[in-house]
Image (cartoon, rainbow, N blue to C red):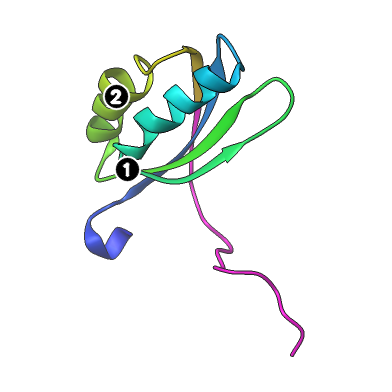
Amino acid sequence: PAKLGFAITVFAMVSLKSQAESSLREFEEHRRALPEVREWHMLNGEIDFILKVVAKDLQSFQQFLTSKLTPAPNVVSVKTSLTIRTSKSLPGVPLPV
């Protein structure tokens, strides 16, 4: 990502007002239009979704956060953590050799 100009990786923890299936679908539909979101996982517990988001810089991430993610349907809160360093990132699953 950095070689392509996306210097920032952020994990966003999203809490929703409702976890009804129709509300979840509406939120997921909104997410499909967000190319900055590279991974999307629904969780159980306090946080409903965790998103891996890439951005060119902090200003573009802030713009994404305030104009696209926070106002999304059914969102009650978004907590973010900026990645400082990635020590390991492997695609796929571990298969025996």
Secondary structure under badge 2? helix
Residue topped by disc 2 = 68
Of residues 30 and 46, which is closer to you in this image? 30
Query: Image height check: is 21 above or below 83?
Result: above
Is mark 1 in CB contact (under 8 Å) with mark 2? yes
Query: Image height check: is 48 above or below 5?
Result: above
Q: Residue at x 30, y 44 (%)?
A: 35
Side of 51 relative to 67 (left or right): right
The image position of residue 41, as x and y in percent, is 58, 40
Side of 16 relative to 97 (left or right): left
The image position of residue 91, as x and y in percent, is 54, 68
The CA span between labels 1 and 2 is 10 Å
In the figure, residue 94 lies in which quadrant? bottom right
Residue at the outermost bottom position? 97
Of residues 67 and 56, which is closer to you in this image? 67
Give the residues in magenta: 80-97
Q: Is 68 contained in the magenta span?
A: no
The quadrant of the rendering that contains the N terminus is: bottom left
Q: Residue at x 30, y 18 (%)?
A: 66
Q: Amino acid at mark 2?
A: Lys
Side of 37 relative to 22 (left or right): left
Q: Residue at x 50, y 13 (%)?
A: 77
Q: Amino acid at mark 1?
A: Glu
Residue topped by disc 1 = 36
The quadrant of the rendering that contains the C terminus is: bottom right
